[in-house]
Amino acid sequence: MRAVVAVDWSEQSFSAVKVVCRLFTHEELTLIHAVDLRPFENPLFAQPLGRKSAEALRQGMVAAGERLLDQTVALVPSTVPSIKRICRIGNPAPVVLEATRSSHADLVAVGSQGRGRLAELVLGSVSHRVVLHAPCAALLVRDDPGNIRRVLLGVEGHEDSFRLRRWLSTHRFSQPIELSLVTVVPTIPIGDSTMEFRYDKWTAEMEQYARQLVDETAAALRTIYPAVTAQIEHGDPAHCITKAAGQADLVIVGSHGWRGLEHFLLGSVSHAVLHKVTCPVLVIR
């Protein structure tokens, strides 16, 4: 696997490095730190500092970034054959995304301090921007769960199942895992009594579809990971997956690629799960 991990001085980013190294066997690991000078480009800071002081500040922050990478490299096991380190000045999210694209990464990982959805909407979030716009699978880590054994896989449909199975067969976990597969039959709101006669029919059809989905997905995954269980839940998908994630060390969901206004209006299960689940979340696209 070729993986990129964004690092800063937070414990969450150090945890991201540890989790990535523990989950997969790596062909190449790139550690990237973005030096964000934008706050100091504001005239209120820049003019009093002066050109000479501003250059000294820039050099100091770059040197600190290099020290950070020294510290982070020490967390990487000696079994990783190739470690690249990048310290670059720029807006963190675009810098990380560009490094991910240029290295043709299979996975990008970021730490998250757990900013809420409202704060993300107003202030932005580097970690969630990277996960949302990454050209490959993305891992968001809030805490290091230690030994990762119990993995929850949320599946929304046959296309989603195929995407998840293909990725998991290509990028296998480095240690044995117990894979718990869940799909959720959403509750249909009935606001018109004339629609009630169709409700049972729709529910039965969705139940049949869900059963076929989990059986086929579980059967395919058992050829790779022998310890696979499957279950069907009913209700709000994000809520059900979040509840089931309480017993998991890692949650895996697919991304349907919502962007812009479409993403804002419709949202997605994966985006909701990112904000609610406390263990690492792997989003596969």
Image (cartoon, rainbow, N blue to C red):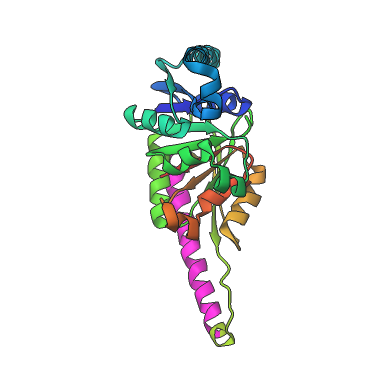
Q: Is residue 135 placed above or below 264 in the rendered structure? A: above
Can residue 31 be seen by looking at this rendering? Answer: yes
From the top left corner, tell me how far across and down residue 92 is, in percent: 47, 30
Quick check: 136 left or right of 242? left
Q: How many circles with numbers are drawn on the protein?
A: 0
Pick the front one: 186 or 276 = 276
Q: Is residue 216 magenta?
A: yes
From the top left corner, tell me how far across and down residue 272 is, in percent: 56, 51
Residue at 55% across, 88% down: 194
Main secondary-structure element of the magenta-colored stretch: helix
Residue at 49% across, 27% down: 41
Pick the front one: 175 or 24 = 24
Quick check: 84 left or right of 11? left
Q: Is residue 27 placed above or below 138 in the rendered structure? A: above
Residue at 52% across, 36% down: 127
Q: Quadrant of residue 133?
A: top left
Q: Is residue 89 magenta?
A: no
Pick the front one: 22 or 28 = 28
For the record, the magenta segment spans 197-224
Q: Is residue 171 placed above or below 255 in the rendered structure? A: above
- Residue at the bottom extreme of this rendering: 194
Which quadrant holds the N terminus? top left
Can residue 78 be seen by looking at this rendering? Answer: no
Which quadrant holds the C terminus? top left
Pick the front one: 178 or 58 = 58
From the top left corner, tell me how far across and down residue 283 is, in percent: 48, 42
